[in-house]
Image (cartoon, rainbow, N blue to C red):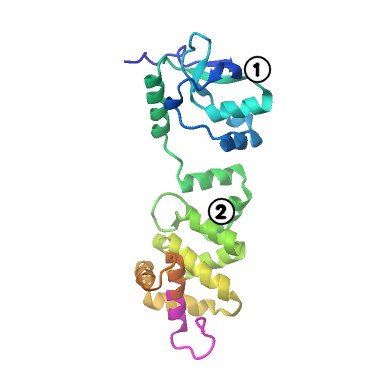
Amino acid sequence: MTDGFTKSAHATQWIPVKNLSIVWATAQREFNERHADKIASGFDPDLFDDLVVTLPNGNGIYHVVDGQHRKAAIQKLYGEDEKVPCRVVNATDPSRAAAIFDKINTGRRSPSAVEKFKVRVTAGYEDEVAINKVVTWLGYRITGETSDGTIRAVAALMSVYKTFGLEVLKETLMTIKGTWSDDCHAVDGPIIEGFAALIGEHRGHLDFKRLREQTAKKFTPGRLIGNAKGEREITGGSLGHCVSRVLIRQYDQGLRNGKLGG
C-alpha cells in the first residue's frame, strides 16, 4: 500500500550529490562509466530530469532509484557538493526501491522512429530537415499512419540519405511516385532501399522512364516485395538489395544494349 498522490510528496528537493548513493546494489542496474561520461560530455541542463531517490537512511544517504548515471555526470562536472533535483519516494527498503525501479523502466514507452524523426525536424537537425524538405516537396507526409501519400519508413529514408546523398533520395522517391502514385505500400522500407540501390549505382546511364514503365507493367508494390522475398531465399542478402536485383532483371527484359545487369 502506498501513500496517495500529493503535491508535497512529489515536490522536487535539491540534494547534494555527496548524499546520494546506491545503497542497495541489487535494486539497481550495474553502473556504466561510459554512460556517465557521455551524459557529462553532452550535458544540457534543460534535459536534466529529476532523480528518483528513497528516504534517507540513518546516515543521511538517499538511495538513487533512478538516475545514477545523471548523478555521476554532475559529480564529474561540478563535484560532490553540487545539488541536483530529486523526487523523494516513500521507500526505506531495497524491495520497494527495486519495485519502483522496475516500474519506472518498464512503464516508459520509447518514442517511435517516426516520432523521433518529426521531433528532430522541429529541433532543426540538419539531416532530418533536409530529408523532410524532399519528402514534403514531393507531396508526401511522414506519419505513423498508413494511408496513401504517407511514409513511415524513416529508417530507410535516413539510410539512403547517408549512403547515397540527398539527390539519389529525391530521385528514388520521384521514381517510386511516378511508378505507383501515392500508394503508401510503395514507400515501404525495402522498396525505397531497393530503388535507391539501383539508382545510386546506375543513375549515370539509367533510363528513368523505362524503369518506371517496366516496373509498373509487372509489379504492384506487394508483388515486388513477394518476388524479392523469393529472390532472398535463393541468393540471400537484405530484402532491399533483393528488390534492386528484381528491378534490374525487369528493366533488362527485351534490351540488347544498355542492360544494367551486365
Tell me the amino acid under the disc marked 1: Asp
Q: Identity of the amino acid at label 2? A: Asn
- Name which of mark 1 and mark 2 comes first in the sequence: 1
Say which of 142 and 200 sits in front: 200
* Secondary element at tag 1: loop
Give percent across and percent down for residue 109: 42, 37
- In percent of the image, x 62 and y 35: which residue is there? 37
In magenta, the rendered stretch is: 246-262
Label drawn at residue 132? 2
- 232, 251: nearer the viewer: 232
Residue 139 or residue 9, whichever sits in front: 9
For mark 1, does the 10 Å Cα neighbourhood hold few (<14), some (14 to 19), or many (20 or more) residues? few
Residue on which disc 1 sits: 81
The image position of residue 11, as x and y in percent, is 50, 15
Element on which disc 2 rests:
helix
Q: Residues within 10 Å of mark 2 (few under 14, many from 20)?
A: many
User: Which residue occupies 46% across, 68% down?
Assistant: 241
Q: What residue is at 60 percent from the left and 51 percent from the top?
A: 129
Q: CA distance from mark 1 to mark 2?
A: 45 Å
Residue 205 appears left or right of 65:
right
Seen from this angle, which residue lies furthest bottom?
Answer: 256
